[in-house]
Image: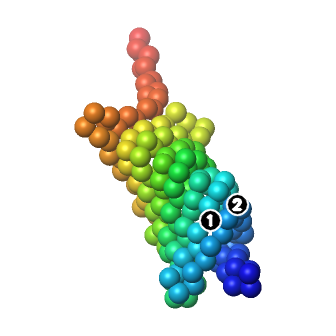
């Protein structure tokens, strides 16, 4: 029990700028392997970002800093990029690489930009926040679908 409490305190201090709060039914940590596993109704909140999943594994480096978050099972999320764009969506699996600010979403991905009509559906969607880039991949029988508004302005004829 003492080990679990120390590991939990470590996770609380991972990110100083915004508090990282993780709630789950079960928690397991293996400091030697550099991972902590949260299972059962997992909810993670950090600033404007929120993630819900059946299981989340947090990978840490030798300096006890998170290097990767892996969420699995009915993943639902809300996130805000550096330029203020807000997204919400769902997938069966999500990975977040905090050092690179890269989000990878897999299997039945639905991603929607809030306050806009931009939407991506596919089997794999990657958001590279620092580069302001997005990639999507579908399957042969289920292609990528992108939905967005085109605001065409009609020019008035000058007479």
Label 2–label 1 contact, CB within 8 A? no
Picture disc at residue 25 = 2
Q: Check the image and report above or below for 32 versus 144.
A: below
Q: Which mark is residue 64?
A: none
Q: Quadrant of the C terminus?
A: top left
Residue 148 occupies quadrant: top left
Give the farthest residue toward the top. Answer: 159
The structure residue drawn at horizontal position 66% and vertical position 76%, both measured from the top left corner, is 11
User: Considering depth in this image, is 44 or 128 the residue closer to the camera?
Assistant: 44
- Residue at image location 59% in from the left, 50% down from the top: 77
- The reply to whether residue 129 is in sight is no
Relative placement, left or right, of 2 versus 158 is right
Secondary structure of residue under mark 2 = loop
How many neighbours does mark 1 have within 10 angstroms: few (below 14), some (14-19), or many (20 or more)?
many
Instruction: Identify the image's colour scheme: rainbow, by chain, secondary structure or one colour.
Output: rainbow
Q: Position of residue 32 (x, y in %)?
A: 53, 87
Residue 7 in view, yes or no: yes
Q: Residues within 10 Å of mark 2 (few under 14, many from 20)?
A: few
Residue furthest to the left in view is 140
How far is the residue under mark 2 from the one under mark 1?
7 Å
Look at the picture and state if 32 lies above or below 98: below
Residue 8, compared with residue 143, is above or below; it is below
Q: Tally the marks.
A: 2
Q: Disc number at residue 38?
A: 1
């Amino acid at each position: 029990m003492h080990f679990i409490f120390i590991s939990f305190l470590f996770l609380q201090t991972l990110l100083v700028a915004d508090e990282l709060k993780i709630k789950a039914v079960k928690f397991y940590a293996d400091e030697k392997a550099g991972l902590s596993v949260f299972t059962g109704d997992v909810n993670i909140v950090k600033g404007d970002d929120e993630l819900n999943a059946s299981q989340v594994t947090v990978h840490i480096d030798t300096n006890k800093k998170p290097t990767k978050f892996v969420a699995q099972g009915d993943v639902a999320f809300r996130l805000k990029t550096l330029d203020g764009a807000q997204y919400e969506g769902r997938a069966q699996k999500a990975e977040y690489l905090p050092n690179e600010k890269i989000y990878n979403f897999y299997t039945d991905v639905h991603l929607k930009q809030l306050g806009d009509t931009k939407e991506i559906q596919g089997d794999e969607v990657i958001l590279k926040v620092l580069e302001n880039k997005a990639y999507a991949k579908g399957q042969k029988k289920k292609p990528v679908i992108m939905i967005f508004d085109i605001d065409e302005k009609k020019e008035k004829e000058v007479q």
